[in-house]
Structures are given as C-alpha cells and as structure tokens.
Image: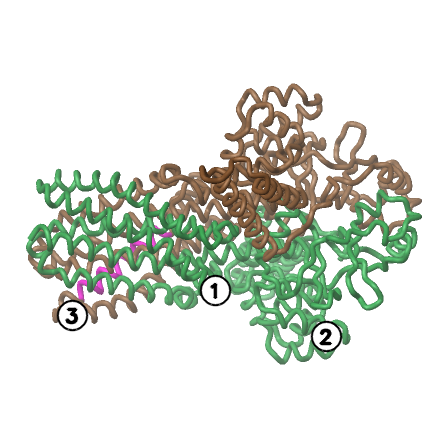
Chain colours: A green, B brown
C-alpha cells in the first residue's frame, strides 16, 4: 500500500503512452531484424539492444501507478498490450486487473493461465476480488476462496450478494473501529500502533461490543480535541450511514450533497458491515455517466478501441435492429399514403422536416424531465402542470417554426394550402411530441423503470411515424 | 461550520419535499379562508393556525442542511419557492445560494434587494463568492469586495481570473500549512490550537518560508508516526500537485486514478496558491456529465422544471433552429429527385430507412471514439487503423441489414432491382457514416475543439442528406 509510484499529470500520462509505444516500436524493429533470414540469428548486439529495450520498459512500468499502467494497456492494440502485460511484475497483476476497463480485462485474463490468475487474485482485498469475480473462471474463484480467511470469505460473500448499482456492491471492509468508552488518548495510542490507516480514513467508526454503530469520530476532530475526553463525548451521532441495499445513485447524491469522504454501511440491526468511500463513489459516477453516454449513442457496452470488426458488430447490432424496426414502421406509414404522394410529390420532400423537428422537440422535453426526475424535483401533482407547460411550449414552437416552414413551403411550391397543411402538421406533431415527451418518462417512472433508458428511441419512433401520418393525412384531406 | 443539521437519506429527502408541500398547501387553504369575504377577516383562530404552519415550516428548515434546502427550493414552483425562501434564516442565504442550480439561483436573487444580497454574500468564502459572482449585480459585488481583507480580495481575484473548466476555478483557499523543520509533536500541538480543521483536510501542505510547496503530510501518516520525528522526514514529496490553469477534466481524472481527497494547487514558481478537494471534483464531474446530457438532448442549459413557457422556449429554440436548417437541406436533396419519386413512389417510403440507419450507425462510431478520446486511448497513428476497422464494421452492417432490407423491399414491391438498389444504398450510406463518424471527431480534435460537441448534429445532417442522395441517385440511375 505504500505509495512509492510516480503520479502523473495529464500530459505526462499521454507522454508515457507515447514512450511505451516508441519502446515497443524499436523493440519490433529489432525483432524484425533478428527474424530476418539474412541476419545472423544470434547476433549478440541485436539481442542486447532487444533486451535493453525490454528492460527499460520494465523499469518504466515498475515506477508507474497501477491506474496508469491500466491506462497504457487500454491505449495499446491487442498484441502490444500483451507484450506490456508480460513485462508487468506478477505481484502487481491483481491491482491492475481491478483498474482496467472490462473489455480490456477480458483480453488480459484470456492470456493468463489459472495459476497466474489465482496468484493475482490472492493479492486483492475481498471487495476488489468481488469487482473482478465475474470475469474470472469459476475454478480460479474456487481456489482463491479456499485460501481466504473465514472473515474474508464472509466479506466476499457479502460483496457478491448485492446487485450492481447497490451500496453493498461498492463498499469495502477496511475501516478502523473504536469503542465509545475509551479516552481520545487511548484511541490515539491505538492508532499509533497501526502501521498505517486504510486510505480515505477521515473518520473512525465508533461501535459497541456487538459491533452496533454508535457514531463516528472524525480524525479532524480527534486531532484538535483535548485528549483527556472520552470518545463518547466527541463522537458524531447523526453522521450519514447507508444500508447495503440502498441504491448507489442515492448514496452518490448524499456524498455530493454532504461532501463526504467516507460513510459507514450498517445492516438492519445497525451493526457495522462495511464502508463506502468517495473514491468508490467517484468511480461509480463516472461509470454510470459513461453507461448512459454509451446507451444514448447506441452501444451495448464500453467498447475496446482495438476490438475486432466482429466484436464491434456484436456490441452494436441490437441497437441497429431496434432502429430498423421503427424505421420500417415509419416506412409503412408512408407506404399507406403512396397514392397521395404520387399526386403531389412535394409531400415526399417536406415530410422528413415535420418528423425530424417533432423528434428533436420531444427529446428536449424528455431530457429535461429525466434530469428533473434524477434530481428528485418532480412530485406527483406536478406532472399535470408540467404537461400543460410542455404543450404550451409546443404550441409556441409550432406557431414560430410552423409559420416559418409554411412560408418556405409556399415559397418553393407556390401553394398556400400546402403551406397551411405544413404549418398545421408541425403544430400537431409538436403537441404529439410534448405528450410523448412527458408521457413516456412518466409511464416508465410509474412502472418503476429507469425513465431514461430507451425513452429517446421510443419517442423518435412515435414522432417519426406520427409526423408522417399527420402530415400526409392532412395533405390527403385538404389538398387532394 | 459545526454540522448540527440533519443528514437525510434518499427517501427522507423526498419525504421532506412532500412535507414542505403539505405545509404550504395547508397554509394556502388558511390564507384562502382568511381572504374570503364571508369570513371575519381577523379571525383569531385562523391566524393562529396560519402562523403555526409557518413556524413549523421554519423550524423544519432550520434543521436542514443547506444542500437539502436547495433541493426543496428546486422542487417547488416559483410562488411557493419564494414563500420557503423568505422563511430561511437570513444568515443561511449565502450557503444556500451556492448550492442551488443556476436557474433557481437567478430566481432567488431576483427576489432579494441589494442589502440582503450583500449580507448573504458576506457570509461566503472567497471561492464560494467566485462561484455565484456571475449572478450577482455588479453593485453588490463592489460592496462585498470593499468589506474583504486584502488576502481574501486577492483570493477572489485569483478564483475569478481562471476560466470555467480550469483547476483555478474549482480551487479553495482553506488549507493548513506546516514547515518542514518542525517536529511532528510541534505540528500536532499547532493543529490542536486550531478550533477545527477545514473540511477535506486529509493532508497538511508543507511549505518553506517563501510559501513554496515542499510536499504534503497526510494526517493518516501524522497519526501513526512517532512524534519525535521531523516533518521533513515523513513528508510525501512526490504528491500530485496541480497548476491553476490545468484542465479540470484532467484533474478529475487524476483524482479518480489516484483516489485523492485533496491536492495542492501551485503557481509556476511552485508557490502554494490553493487547494483542490474531492467534493469540488465530484461537483465538477456531475456538472460536466449533466451538461453533456443536456447538450445531447438539445437544451442550451439546465432548465428550471417550473420555468415559464417563454423561458423554456428560449432555452430550446437554438437547437431546433439548427435542426430546421439541416432538415431543410435534406428536404432540398429530396426535392431534386421529385421527378424520380413521381415515377416510382415506393422510393418515398423507403428512403427514410436508409437515412435513419446511417445516422444511427455513425452515431455509434462517434460515441465510441469520443469516449476513447476522453480516456486518452487514441494516439496519432491509430486513427487510420480505427478508420479501417469502422469501415469494416460498416461493410458488415451493410451486408447484414442491407440484405435484409433489400429482401423486405423486394417482398413489398416485387422488384429485384429495387431491392438491390436498397441494399447497395444501405452499404454506401453506412460507409459514409463510418467516414463521418471517425472524420468529424478527428477533425474537431485536430482543431483543438471538444470532439463531442455538435458531432451528432453534424453527423446526422450528413447521413440524412447523404442517405437520401445515395438512395434516390442510385434509383434514378438504375431503376428509371
């Protein structure tokens, strides 16, 4: 745990990756020369240069923080990644596996045999082991579990028993407890006997004989308070505590609101089970934000930049398939009006505008509502007000953009009636978009589902098909 | 700073908001009764009830953490928000203004006169003042600055001089410094004389006579080390430090990689200027992720859920205008092929499928690349490889979905040639989408711009117009 490694700033981090790549490139040139038939195969000089590059690289890696090695591994294509991975000291494999992204972790684990995997896994704490357990072969996990103490085994079981996205899945088990009836002097002496405090120890957890949490003792308070006093006199009783089944999202929001560094996790009886720290919360926030970014962009999961064409296809096909279905439905709506389009071909050129603006406007509504829901700002009775407001915005948007587009349609096609149909269709599709933009997240929230997931796809499907139907339908009624 | 307020968990937070709403509702009923003509205007009982509700609400608010009051204010419509705001004790106005979202802050500030604003602003630290300075009237800021000490004025100047998104804009000035040549014993005695340590003090900053940073002394190390030793012997020299002009995004990534709680900010000469803490970093991460979410959804900025129709329109019109222009261009592309559509009206029904799938596939590519760029995983020479891979994925996608759609087109319209054109157009538009999906973020990154912003709009514009052009063009060539 002693932090002897270099810490890098952003440019240095990129610089590092470039240096490793340069070392690998030179290495490759050497290997290329050694491999060529016209060169003496055991040319001593070449071999030395070869070894020297590898040694230089190895020395560089030894100095780096595991998170930075992880960053380098993620930035290298598969073959070079494995060259670097082999150079990393075996006793650091575990901590690096915890740091890399899931896609890269899979590729690294695939290159290791079970003995190496067991050795790597045994260097980890129970909570870290739980994080990568899903990617390890069952035989490896079994063997590692056998080597754990009863306490660690219990911790691993606890960490694995809570679903992703819960506090239990994020908690660790490295905390320092004290009793309420000792003096601060005694508590300080006890701490001094420890070699070092677990990282992110900004407070000690005060527990009774049965491990029930009585409160916390912030180090900042311990340091400035008279040592004669008892822990009981200075402990903070009302400190935030979590239950392992709490949603990680709620815990993250509490960490943000109350600027926490660590917080105890307790069971139903109030017994201390673990600890949640701000670094786990930061990782969670980043992860959750990455996932929503990926989902919005239509990727099923984080994609290794160097994944093969097939792997990339697998990660993307589901979204495209969904899109194909909705596009097909919209296409059939248009198909139903082919007779009208044949009579007035201008409709074909104008219809995508009506559909597109509807989709965009509806997405604005949904985005606003999903944000407000996530921040807990919408209560039961406000949904109606919101819907009213959104329909108001839709009518205003419709009046502004509908008039503009109606005028443009008139300018291009010289038909007042066509311009009028265009304007009316815009207004109606914007109102439909507002209804759906409020209705879809409302329904998903009522059904207890994540209001964000898939809202945009569903909404665009409705505003596309709906937009085509409204515009072509109105045109058929009034123009033909 | 003493933390006497309640800390709430997620359900309690919602519960709280509901309680406040209930109190406000009852309050309103009473006011309604008092206001009615057929009731005695000064009915004592009613007045008492009225006052009692307000007193209850005020007592409730006094117990809450400023972040939770901010949450309640954000969850209330404008009139009720101001009722609650008036009940908050004046000496807490400042800390709450720092916590609320910008939209709500504006509405609260608009309801206060300059005297109240000056009083609220004077309760804030220099870094907090800098955060809300943009929303305060200049006259108020002038008056507050006059009341600051020279040191605070310098801090405020420093905090305001760095642009949003830089470390300088996030740093605070509450840190504890020690000299390297004192013993830990002396350092501990010095700390004990302080009333309390600034929040997030996990380490002391070790500086020399000229305030040049020599290293840091983690509290966790101070607590477990023999007090006879000198600070110089135990300080951490290689601790991460930032410069105020560093990008906040890079600092956030360093906090994440190295699990930091606080880090010193130094100037060019290595002199200590301020401190960056994990709570500011968490706020930044949340803010940045919210902004990208809003931008993707087509909102210019965070929108107050209770904003008026006009305010909502203002926040949304720019995006819709951009979209209108791109939709109009696509419409003109279709317009150029009206002759072809008139001859073969099936084209009108099929063309949105080609355009839509292209846009979705291109967005997948862009999302993947923007993520990888943000994580620093793409180096100079990998762009070409990436482009090759993406074109490979496009061809595979084209083969799969193109064949499927070609078959469907054939099934509906009975024309093999139409099916073939459909399949070919799909493949070509997917390749175009891959070129743009890689090319747009590449170009933006090369020009030093944020590769994410606007990539999706630009990409969809190209794949829409391009998709229509490719499909209708091929149809004109081969089918008519």
Q: Secondary structure at mark 3?
A: helix
How many numbered discs?
Answer: 3
Q: Which residues are magenta?
A: B420-437
Q: Secondary structure at mark 1?
A: loop
10 Å neighbourhood of mark 1: few (<14), some, or many (≥20)?
A: few
Examine the image and state in which quarter residue A405 appears. top left
Residue A47 lies left or right of residue B378; in this view the side is right
Where in the figure is residue B308, as x and y percent of width and height?
40, 39
Residues indicated by labels 1 and 3 sit on the same polypeptide chain = no
Give the position of the N terminus of chain A as an image quadrant: bottom right
**Residues at circles 1 and 3 in contact by the CB criterion of under 8 Å:** no
Q: Which residue is mark 2?
A: A153
Residue A214 lies left or right of residue A87; in this view the side is right
Where in the figure is residue B91, as x and y percent of width and height?
66, 33
Is B423 magenta? The answer is: yes
Q: Is residue B137 above or below residue A354?
A: above
Residue A39 lies left or right of residue B403; in this view the side is right
- Whether residue A70 can be seen here: yes
Examine the image and state in which quarter residue B12 appears. bottom right
Q: Which residue is mark 1?
A: A448
10 Å neighbourhood of mark 3: few (<14), some, or many (≥20)?
A: few
Estimate the spatial distance between the alpha carbons at disc 1 and disc 3, rounded to whole Å. 40 Å
Subunit ID for the residue under disc 1: A
Estimate the spatial distance between the alpha carbons at disc 1 and disc 2, rounded to whole Å. 34 Å
Q: Is residue A253 above or below residue B446?
A: below
Label annotation for residue B412 = 3
Whichever of labels 1 and 2 marks the residue nearer the N terminus, that label is 2
């Amino acid at each position: 745990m002693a932090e002897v490694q270099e810490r890098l700033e952003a440019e240095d981090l990129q610089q590092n990756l470039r240096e490793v790549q340069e070392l690998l490139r030179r290495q490759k040139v050497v290997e290329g020369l050694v491999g060529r038939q016209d060169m003496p195969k055991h040319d001593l000089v070449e071999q030395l240069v070869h070894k020297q590059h590898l040694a230089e690289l190895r020395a560089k890696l030894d100095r780096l923080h595991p998170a930075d090695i992880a960053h380098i591994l993620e930035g290298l294509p598969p073959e070079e990644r494995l060259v670097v991975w082999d150079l990393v000291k075996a006793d650091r494999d575990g901590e690096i596996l915890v740091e890399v992204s899931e896609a890269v972790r899979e590729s690294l684990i695939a290159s290791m045999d079970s003995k190496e995997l067991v050795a790597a896994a045994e260097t980890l704490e129970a909570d870290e082991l739980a994080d990568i357990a899903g990617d390890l072969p069952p035989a490896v996990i079994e063997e590692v579990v056998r080597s754990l103490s009863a306490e660690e085994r219990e911790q691993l079981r606890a960490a694995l028993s809570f679903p992703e996205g819960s506090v239990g899945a994020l908690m660790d088990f490295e905390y320092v407890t004290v009793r309420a009836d000792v003096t601060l002097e005694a508590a300080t002496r006890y701490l001094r006997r420890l070699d070092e405090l677990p990282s992110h120890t900004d407070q000690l957890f005060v527990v009774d004989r049965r491990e029930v949490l009585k409160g916390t003792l912030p180090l900042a308070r311990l340091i400035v308070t008279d040592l004669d006093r008892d822990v009981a006199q200075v402990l903070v009783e009302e400190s935030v505590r979590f239950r392992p089944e709490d949603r990680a999202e709620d815990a993250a929001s509490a960490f943000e609101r109350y600027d926490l560094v660590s917080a105890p996790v307790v069971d139903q009886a109030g017994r201390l089970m673990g600890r949640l720290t701000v670094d786990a919360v930061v990782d969670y926030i980043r992860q959750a934000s990455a996932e929503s970014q990926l989902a919005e962009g239509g990727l099923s999961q984080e994609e290794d930049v160097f994944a093969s064409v097939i792997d990339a296809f697998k990660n993307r096909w589901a979204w495209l398939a969904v899109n194909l279905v909705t596009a097909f439905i919209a296409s059939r709506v248009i198909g139903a009006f082919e007779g009208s389009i044949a009579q007035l071909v201008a409709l074909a050129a104008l219809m995508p505008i009506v559909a597109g603006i509807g989709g965009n406007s509806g997405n604005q509504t949904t985005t606003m509502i999903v944000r407000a829901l996530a921040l807990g700002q919408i209560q039961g009775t406000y949904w109606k007000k919101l819907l009213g407001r959104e329909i108001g915005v839709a009518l205003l948007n419709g009046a502004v953009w509908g008039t503009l587009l109606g005028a443009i349609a008139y300018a291009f096609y010289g038909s007042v009636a066509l311009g009028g149909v265009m304007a009316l269709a815009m207004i109606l599709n914007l109102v439909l978009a507002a209804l759906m933009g409020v209705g879809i997240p409302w329904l998903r929230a009522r059904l207890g589902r994540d209001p964000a997931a898939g809202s945009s796809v569903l909404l665009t499907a409705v505003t596309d098909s709906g937009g085509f139907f409204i515009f072509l339908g109105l045109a058929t009624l009034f123009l033909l």
